[in-house]
């Protein structure tokens, strides 16, 4: 598998959409260039009394449509290339679902797993102090949220640090907070719910009923496990799941009860671990549960109706795309299908509902949280979900219209466009329009 190159992947997708839209060089350049890149070394306290220095980033891609919005990730592989890509995709994602926010992303290059609670708190406060004192974060400027290995507790410390410096309350400066500090109902499962609304609309259009639809889910964390639960309750058949240790699939024509999946995962910490120890698997137990243990790579190749990617970026790439047998891919993770794989899948007739549509439910409910915090209101869960459904379905329809519009362009080299290209086109159109209205782009 080739090395990951997330920002280059973004530029590649941007180039394709720019060609279809016949963007000028200035327009393309404006979308390819983040408005601000902040990089620093921050020092936090270890329990030993020593201090440790780590590299921290905040990239602000585009604010023509509203304040920057995007998560903060703690990861030992976080780097500028990745943060730039994710910030750019956030501008596009907010634009696809037509919420008035721009795109940003933050990261700290650290493995947070060995840190104690007090060390995590010190790191989080120092990072947000840097962002507040340097005018990077603000309720009307840049509104972060959780991402990989950052939690509602971390958001709480960051909010507290920000408000201490300001000397007044400003709960809307950060989203993904616990309910007690102004978090929104429905935020914890919003990414999965948003993806589910999109999938449901797509399958209904194809006349495919839940009971006739088999689904494999890669990744069983926040996005994947809530998705499996929601889809199962709606009558879809979850026939395979995986986590970082490997996967399991149904050894029959049946499907999994999501309750059992959760129990297996809880009991052994992983799906595989529930049936195997090292290389030795308990055949009787597998038979009784009608389970077959499979590798992560095997799960990707299963002949299912829908493959839901809810784990990592770059998992479907030029070397394995040809072996994908699913009829449809739903990208709940960010960037799980590379541009090279997109081309291969397109030739095979496999449609991909792209990340900037499919996982935009998370940022949409984050936006709801920001609106509630600024107005002092608290919305009921049903109200949140009804609003989310409408936004996701409208976004899907907007992409459908773009696909129709660009299906048969006279003189165009394109013979129809993918869902990803449609998403980029819709997003670009709105961002460029906002920049032109502001006069920042002529
Ligand atoms: P998470 O950490 O809760 O879950 C990730 C899951 O992936 C875990 O179950 C882990 O075991 C599994 N995993 C790791 N490596 C794997 C592998 N090789 N094969 C199969 N499974 C593997 O993370 P999450 O919040 O669910 O996020 C998952 C993806 O969705 C990320 O790309 C994230 O950026 C994206 N996303 C999440 C949200 C959100 O609100 N949580 C919003 C938008 C996008």
Image (spheres, helix red, strand yellow):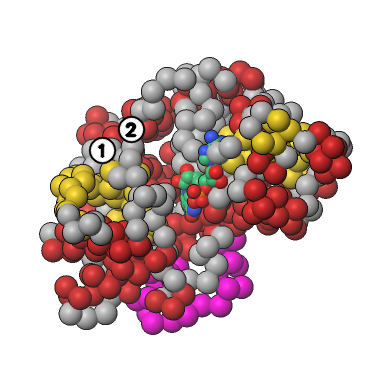
Question: Where residue 327 sits in the image (x, y, percent)?
Answer: 69, 31
Residue at screen point 62% across, 52% down: 225
**Residue 188 can be seen, yes or no:** yes
Which numbered disc flags the more N-terminal residue, 1 or 2?
A: 2
Label 2 neighbourhood size at 10 Å, few (<14), some (14-19), many (20+)?
many
Q: Quadrant of residue 281?
A: top right
- Overall secondary structure of the magenta stretch? helix
Q: Position of residue 286 (x, y in %)?
A: 80, 38
Nearer-the-camera pick, 182 or 416? 182
- Left or right: where 91 falls relative to 340: left
What are the residue bounds of the magenta stretch?
A: 368-390
What residue appears at the point 32 percent right and 74 percent down from the top-left corner?
Answer: 171
- Magenta span contains residue 400: no
The vertical placement of 308 against 156, above or below, is above
Q: Quickly name the residue at label 1.
A: 80
Q: Are marks 1 and 2 in contact (CB under 8 Å)?
A: no
Q: Tag 1: Cα neighbours inside 10 Å, few (<14), some, or many (≥20)? A: many
Q: Secondary structure at mark 1?
A: helix
Is residue 386 rendered magenta in the image? yes
Residue under pointer 2: 7
CA gap between label 1 and label 2 equals 9 Å
**Secondary element at image label 2:** helix
Residue 412 x, y percent position in the rendering: 46, 22
């Amino acid at each position: 598998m080739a090395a990951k190159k997330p920002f280059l992947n973004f530029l590649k997708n941007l180039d394709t959409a720019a060609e279809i839209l016949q963007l000028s060089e200035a327009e393309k350049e404006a979308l390819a260039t983040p408005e601000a890149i902040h990089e620093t070394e921050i020092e936090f306290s270890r329990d030993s009394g020593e201090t440790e220095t780590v590299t921290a980033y905040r990239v602000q891609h585009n604010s023509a449509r509203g304040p920057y919005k995007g998560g903060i990730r703690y990861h030992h592989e976080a780097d500028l290339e990745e943060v730039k890509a994710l910030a750019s995709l956030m501008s596009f994602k907010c634009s696809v679902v037509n919420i008035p926010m721009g795109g940003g992303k933050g990261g700290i290059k650290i493995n947070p797993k060995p840190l104690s609670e007090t060390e995590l708190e010190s790191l989080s406060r120092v990072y947000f102090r840097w962002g507040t004192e340097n005018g990077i974060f603000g309720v009307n400027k840049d509104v972060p949220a959780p991402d990989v290995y950052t939690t509602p507790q971390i958001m709480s410390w960051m909010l507290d640090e920000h408000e201490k410096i300001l000397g007044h309350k400003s709960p809307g400066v950060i989203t993904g907070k616990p309910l007690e500090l102004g978090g929104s109902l429905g935020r914890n499962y919003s990414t999965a719910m948003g993806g589910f609304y999109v999938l449901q609309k797509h399958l209904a259009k194809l006349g495919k009923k839940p009971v006739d639809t088999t689904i494999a889910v890669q990744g069983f964390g926040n996005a994947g496990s809530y998705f499996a639960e929601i889809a199962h309750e709606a009558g879809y058949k979850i026939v395979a799941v995986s986590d970082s240790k490997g996967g399991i699939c149904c050894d029959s024509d049946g499907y999994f009860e999501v309750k059992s999946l959760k129990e297996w995962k809880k009991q052994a910490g992983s799906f595989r671990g529930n049936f195997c120890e090292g290389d030795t698997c308990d055949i009787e137990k597998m038979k009784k549960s009608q389970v077959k243990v499979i590798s992560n790579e095997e799960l990707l190749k299963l002949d299912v109706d829908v493959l839901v990617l809810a784990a990592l970026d770059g998992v479907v790439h030029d070397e394995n795309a040809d072996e994908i047998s699913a009829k449809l891919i739903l990208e709940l993770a960010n960037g799980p299908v590379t541009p090279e794989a997109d081309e291969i899948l397109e030739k095979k007739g496999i449609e991909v509902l792209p990340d900037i549509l499919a996982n935009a439910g998370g940022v949409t409910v984050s936006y709801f949280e920001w609106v509630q915090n600024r107005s002092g209101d608290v919305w009921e869960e049903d109200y949140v979900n009804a609003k989310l459904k409408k936004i996701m379905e409208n976004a899907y329809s907007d992409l459908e219209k773009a696909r129709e519009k660009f299906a048969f362009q006279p003189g165009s080299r394109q013979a129809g466009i993918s869902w990803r290209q449609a998403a980029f086109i819709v997003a670009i159109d709105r961002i460029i329009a906002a920049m032109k209205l502001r006069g920042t782009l002529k």
